Amino acid sequence: MSRPVLGSLTAVPALDRPDLLADPVARALKDLDPADAALVGVAEIDPALADTAEFCAAYGSPLDGSANCVVVAGRRGESVRYAACLVLATTRADVNGLVRRRLDARKASFAPMDDAVAITGMEYGGITPVGLPADWPLLVDAAVAAAPAVVIGSGVRHSKLALPGELAARLSGAEVVEGLGH
């Protein structure tokens, strides 16, 4: 399973290597239609190279073929709502504009690392849109949805997933948002 977005890495079907997936990611992949699950590949990497820039440089993966998943906390009074945003690594999520309005929040910011890790059950630097809490919106930038393939986290730092952008846009809770990444 070779995907150009993985650079020098070769992926195998993600469900064949549950040891390379966080538990919530493995469960979510098992819940997908088998034809969709078959589109998701996983490749083992050096966990020290999990951050996008280092990953792309080390493995020859194009930066515009990587998508980052960020967890956002929106606050209104005492209420906190979470969402995840999936944007190309060459852009930044419009947290204070589009995301804040989508969450109907007065203030929105990146969720604290400890909160994001505890709530998702994933490792920091490996958080992925696959297997997020069911009640979270997943905002997917239109450029990600249109990509033939993207590299995303696997829930752990020692691997990466590769999948079609259109599949990312069909994950649980997903909503394609034009201009989310800028």
Image (spheres, grey):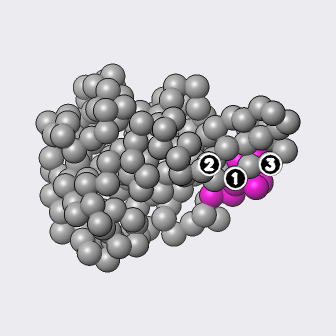
Residue type marked 3: Lys
Residue type marked 1: Ser
User: Are the residues flagged by discs 1 and 2 in contact, CB closer than 8 Å?
Assistant: yes
Q: Quadrant of the C terminus?
A: bottom right
Q: Which mark is residue 146?
A: none
The verdict on residue 96 being magenta is: yes
**Residue identifier under label 2:** 111
User: Are the residues flagged by discs 3 and 2 in contact, CB closer than 8 Å?
Assistant: no
Neighbours of disc 3 within 10 Å: few (<14), some (14-19), many (20+): some
What element does badge 1 sit on? strand
Q: CA distance from mark 1 to mark 2?
A: 6 Å
Give the percent coordinates (x, y) of residue 104.
80, 37
> Magenta region: which residues?
93-101
Would you say 8 lies left or right of 36 here?
Answer: left
**Residue identifier under label 3:** 107
Residue in the image at 76% along x and 55% along y: 96
Magenta span: predominant SS is helix
Neighbours of disc 1 within 10 Å: few (<14), some (14-19), many (20+): some
